[in-house]
Image (cartoon, rainbow, N blue to C red):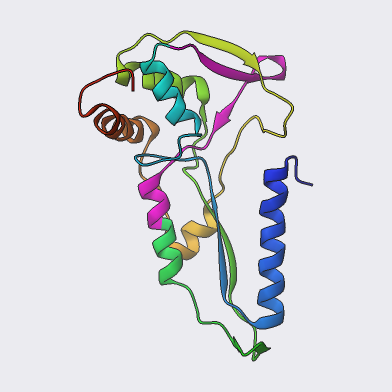
Amino acid sequence: QPASLYAATKKAGEEIAHTYNHIYGLSLTGLRFFTVYGPWGRPDMAYFFFTRDILKRKPIPIFEAANHGTVARDFTYIDDIVKGCLAALDTAEKSTGTGGKKKGPAQLRVYNLGNTSPVPVSNLVSILERLLKVKVKRNIMKLPRNGDVQFTHANVSLAQRELGYKPTTDLQTGLKKFVKWYTSFYSGGKKAAG
């Protein structure tokens, strides 16, 4: 029972993939990414716009769940995600169907690709504060009721067993690489308000 439209689209996509696999013998692999971050990332992700806003000296919203509960995410560095994608490609089998006719069962897999270590969003802000050398003003806010969850945590045991997937980048290391890229890309190597 998905809690958000986003989750419902993910579930629907996996159901459609299963149906195509079953009817047409298409070999399919689904990859579930957990809070991917790093250079060239999405500007709508918290780590990205927090960095921009910290450099502009803007207050940072920190959401907390009911009863002052911590909001945490399984932040996964882009290099670890890429390794998982390549491993999935390297182990993919051929489809068993051609011309709309299935000749036998085909491979169907779904893997979680995450870091397996949820980190409170407040810790993310503290790391960025140290890396950017800017004191952050935090605005503590209640987690909105838009289907967003209190925490994400990837169980990667299947990907580990079948793909040899093993994330190696901790948040401190990954954010250091991101901040180096961000400050270079947005300010020509000079720390500016971005």
Q: Which residues are magenta?
A: 58-83
Q: Is residue 166 visible?
A: no
Quarter of the picture containing the C terminus is top left
Q: Residue at x 46, y 65 (%)?
A: 88
The x and y percentages for residue 15 are: 72, 63
Q: Is residue 152 visible?
A: yes
Looking at the image, residue 117 lies above or below residue 83: above
The x and y percentages for residue 131 are: 31, 21
Looking at the image, residue 27 lies above or below residue 119: below
Q: Hey, which residue is sitting farthest right in the picture? A: 1
Q: Quadrant of residue 146?
A: top right
Q: Quadrant of residue 108?
A: bottom right
Left or right for 61, reference 47: right
Left or right for 52, reference 23: left
Q: Is residue 66 magenta?
A: yes
Q: Residue at x 48, y 73 (%)?
A: 92
Q: Is residue 33 magenta?
A: no
Q: Residue at x 62, y 90 (%)?
A: 99
Left or right for 45, reference 78: right
Q: Residue at x 28, y 19 (%)?
A: 192
Viewer-closest of 4 and 119: 4
The x and y percentages for residue 154 are: 56, 45
Viewer-closest of 118 and 184: 184
The x and y percentages for residue 113 are: 50, 51
Q: How many marks?
A: 0
